[in-house]
Amino acid sequence: MNSPLLEVTDLTKFFPVSGPGIFSRERGINKAVNGLSFTLNKGETLGLVGESGCGKSTAGRTILKLYDPTSGSIKFEGEEISGYSNQKMKPLRTKMQMIFQDPQSSLNPRQSVGAIIAASFEVHGIKPEGGVKRSVQELLERVGLSAEHYDRYPHEFSGGQRQRIGIARSLALRPKFIVCDEPVSALDVSIQAQVVNLLTDIRDDFGMSYLFIAHDLSVVQHISDRVGVMYLGKMMEIAPTESIYSSPHHPYTKALLSAVPIPDPVLERKREQIVLQGDLPSPMNPPSGCVFSGRCWKATTKCFEVEPKLTKVGKAEVACHFPE
Amino acid sequence: MSGLLTYISRRLMITIIILLAVSFTVYVIFALLPYDPAALTCGKNCNDPGIIAANRIRLGYDKPFWVQYWIFLTGLFVGRDFGSGAAAIHCDAPAFGYSFQQHACVTDLLGQALPVTVYLAIGALILWLIVGIGLGIISARFRGKIWDTLSTAFVLVGTSLPTFLTGLILIVFLVIKLPGSPFPADGYTAPEEDFGQFLLSMVLPWVTLAFAYAAIYTRFVRSQILEISTEDYIRTAKAKGLSDRMILGKHTLRAALAPIVTMAGLDFAGLLGGAILTEAVFNLPGMGRLSLTAVVDIDLPVIVATTIVAASIVVIMNMILDIVYAFIDPRVRV
Amino acid sequence: MSLLSVRDLRVEFKTPDGIVKAVAGVSFELKQGETLAIVGESGSGKSVSNLAYMGLLPQSKTTITGSVILETEDGPVDLIGLAPEKLRAIRGKDIAMIFQDPMSALHPYYTIGDQLIEAHQVHNDVDKKVSADRAIELLTLVGVSNPAERLHSYPHQFSGGMRQRVMIAMALMNNPKVLIADEPTTALDVTVQAQILRLLRDIQDQFEMAVILITHDLGVVAGAADRVNVMYGGRLVESAEVGELFKDPLMPYTVGLLDSIPRMDKGHGNRLKAIPGQPPSLITLGDGCAFAARCSRKAELPEGTCETSPDLIAVKKEHLVRCHLYVGKGK
């Protein structure tokens, strides 16, 4: 039994929100990630879905130590990295990378594409065989661009192409693990398919593991082996992909799935939609007990008082007192 | 509304603390200067050690630093005596000290100089706001056309010409070379004495001081308006069917107002500390001239006083602006 | 009954890089009570075409030609070339528009009550109290609780979904005949999207409004639209009733688009059929078919066919397509 590539246990990330006033009294704490646990195996793709404020992006960044966790454990290849300083993280960064959401703002407009990708090598002092330039050009070709693009600047490319550049950059050091933070949300629909295919190909060719964070459930389903559903900083349900989509156990998962419109007029108009009432509560004021209790149609007194733990139900792990 | 009141009281408290800190800091700085305040009290070229020693005791410069500061601070509230007995000099509250070179309580000197600067600053402020905002709106509205180009030229000239040059040019062409010019070349007449002459004596200084600011504000207002016009809520306003004038007046300007108010407030506060160049060119007896003379003569009590007053005005203005801003932008009031 | 008749609408922008032909001859009809979805990606012209006849495009360096006839109480009016004051009288009254990002679409310094009342006061010479009552009525309708109190709230005190409801209420203040919704739910969470789409549907029934729904999301189209116009490169390339479009898409772009969307109901793991290449530049786009460069079926036609622009032909009843593959097959 191989040990998992990534093991996250009870991860929290809180952001203090300071109020106006002389002594900057703390107005509250934004509990962006509030107790997250999961494992990721080598070669696996775990999709992380949820709506605004659920903490999925914060979780991705905290796992990569772009933020320091407030508490909890992050084990990468068995090594506990949650307390590591930037200095200690540096050698590990060749193994864990990130692809960002906005292809426009995540590339330095003043650097050529070649320089952007080459920076990965330079920062870690790695000299690939055949030279940096050759490696960069190979990467450009691997992601569907051409070697001549080496000297061009980001503004000369379209959104989809810029995202490919971002992917090339993250690939440069052949990481084992990539966090994809909404990699296709900012792209046109016809380009999304191209980039999703590219990500799938790369994963298969290099045996990469992905943490695929997105709000678009259809895309996540397509690329992930397992999917985790987050709400207000906590994991509601985590299960193999087929299980989540065919038989969701958590009421929130059901509501979320039912809200996604299906591109088929007959099916879309026929099916029963669960429309949730009310708005997402603020992550500064998560409800006590189950975080979903305020909007759940099945909530009982117990749900408002006792927080459910992730328990096995069928193939899934569900945090609910009354799973479907 | 209670949110607003809490906000105001917080700002008030913090301002008082800052004012104390300011007065202390200035006092420390001057205490550290390599000048013997006692030696300066009998004029620049005075060397009689007897008088100096006597003055040192009279004025309390022999006491420890903390005591001196405490005496200074209390003097601000209750007035202060310099020396004792028959030769004592009394200055009423707020007592900033006593200037031996000018033989007057500093507070009285401030009292004469401050109004002049205030009139100068207010007049200039009104003038530059009218011109700056007006021209800014016009050049945004007629972007790329003749008015915009003209105002760009104005901006260029206004920001390049140093204040004293503007003032001298005005004097040369509107006073010296203009036969029968109503404007005095320099000098100041208090409004209580002769209001007409007061106005005439202030027109050129107002124009001089306002010129550079008007140029800066024109540019700023123009860019603010153009930037805000691209905001989504302006598009919403258009989609509702509002006329261009209504959009400009109600939506665009209101949004542009906030940074303009802040800028104008701070510029005004800075001027109240003394518009040194303008006052020098037009020979106006304001705070600028007072500070300048004091520095040249090394009249320490006056320098300390003008510094503290100028700094305090800025601090208080900051507080006022914060409160005004909360009235303009509701998002700040939380 | 056609509420809106758009004929050969063209929009061009003069830019330093050349003339951008953002909309290159679009024609369609909108019937009363109908929901017409206009689907396309960035650069397709779906937003620009509607902003054009609303008079919401910047005036300098923009050329708009064609005709857009709106049926008003005073008879048909051509919105193109209409005097600005007359267009303003129609904008927000007969035709209302809501936009994509509710976070930035409301003025941050004014209460929502002020902004709602303003929308009404611009077109109605009545007491402010009347407008306020109407605002409360509409806020209730769109699902804002405590509407009378909320009139005094500021936009930043509402969530995204709530703000979009306020925007919808604002659009309805003057009982418009046509509501143009430009990507109204794109910036919202999917559960909130479901709420808003349901709301739009309910309102449309109640007000007998026609809705133009501009979107790139085919799922939204499937659930909300009666008819669909597909746009590409500034042109209308296919138009059909919604069931018909999904069942029998004709234009290769439409086919490609439908094939490239990951579907939750179709199982996972298979490769997505992506459309190769990039959307065209609207400056250099010549007269030929806009999609030719990316079309997989170009080879089926004699060489050079796709260099001329095909006409919009009715291949079946109410199903129009602009593609050389169907020339000669029209009815």
Image (cartoon, rainbow, N blue to C red):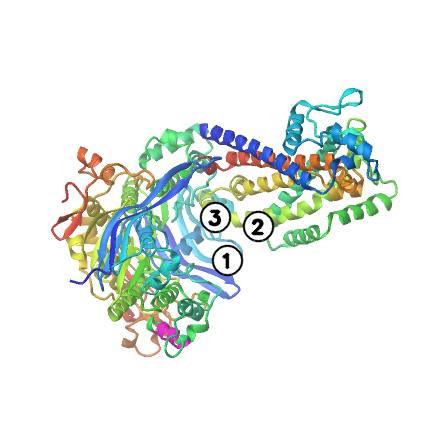
Name the mark on residue B231: 3
For disc 1, the marked residue is: C62
Q: Are marks 1 and 2 in contact (CB under 8 Å)?
A: no
User: Is residue C245 visible from the viewing direction of this image?
Assistant: no
Label 3 chain ID: B
Identify the main secondary structure in magenta: helix
Nearest the eye: B90 or B3: B90
Residue type, label 3? Glu
Report whether mark 1 lies on the same chain as mark 3: no
Task: Read off the chain for label 2.
Answer: B
Q: Quick check: B313 left or right of C9?
A: right
Q: For the residue labelled by badge 2, is the local secondary structure a helix, a strand or a loop? A: helix
Farthest residue, direction left: A314
How far apart in space, not on screen, are marks 1 and 2 (Cα)? 22 Å
Same subunit: marks 1 and 2: no
Counting other residues with Cα less than 10 Å from the Cα at mark 3, is it few (<14), some (14-19), or many (20 or more)?
some
